[in-house]
Image (cartoon, rainbow, N blue to C red):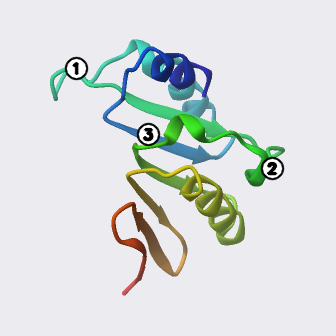
Amino acid sequence: MAQLLDLRRKRFKPACAYVFDDNSWLFRVEADEWHSQPNRFDGSQLYAHIQIDEEDIPERIDFRPLTGLEVHLMGYRSDERTLRLYEAIKRVGPLILAAPTSTSVMIFKKETGDELHPNS
């Protein structure tokens, strides 16, 4: 999240942010290097990658750099923890927040609020 915070202080806004609640090595690499690897296929936009560790407490994480962004939350640990992260991120005012669970997809839009889309 440090890279995103630094870029937001410089008034840069990435195309969107992906928040991964997982300890995977691949997600760690993406979280460490996203700010230096623009996407060549869409005009060199940057997509923030943030990895949440198992020890992190969702309600104590400073998600303010996500304010006003489109955020995709991928909670791989449990539906309960995904909901806690969803609520914590929602409090900072993302433009859009989407989070799949085992039974539905939760979507928050700044202008309309929460939506719940059950899996078919």
Left or right, 56 with reference to 10: right
For image coordinates 70% across by 71% down, the residue present is: 80
Q: Residues within 10 Å of mark 3 (few under 14, many from 20)?
A: many
Residue 74 placement (x, y as % from top left): 53, 54
- Measured along the vertical axis of the image, is residue 9 above or below residue 101? above
Identify the residue shown where x is 62% and y is 21%.
2
Task: Estimate the spatial distance between the alpha carbons at disc 1 and disc 3, rounded to whole Å.
Answer: 15 Å
Vertical side of 113 occupied by 59: above or below: above
SS type, badge 2: loop
Q: Quadrant of residue 91?
A: bottom right
Quarter location, residue 81: bottom right
The amino acid marked with disc number 2 is Ile
The mark nearer the N terminus, 1 or 2, is: 1
Q: Is residue 79 left or right of residue 106?
A: right
Q: Which residue is mark 3?
A: 17
Q: Which amino acid lies under the numbered mark 1 shown in the image of this protein? A: Ser
Q: Earlier in the sequence, mark 1 or mark 3?
A: 3
Q: Which mark is residue 44?
A: 1
**Residue of label 2:** 57
Mark 3 vs mark 2, CA separation in Å:
19 Å
Coordinates of residue 64 in the picture (x, y in percent): 59, 39
User: Is the Cβ of the residue at disc 1 closer than 8 Å to that at disc 2?
Assistant: no
Q: Is residue 114 left or right of residue 76?
A: left
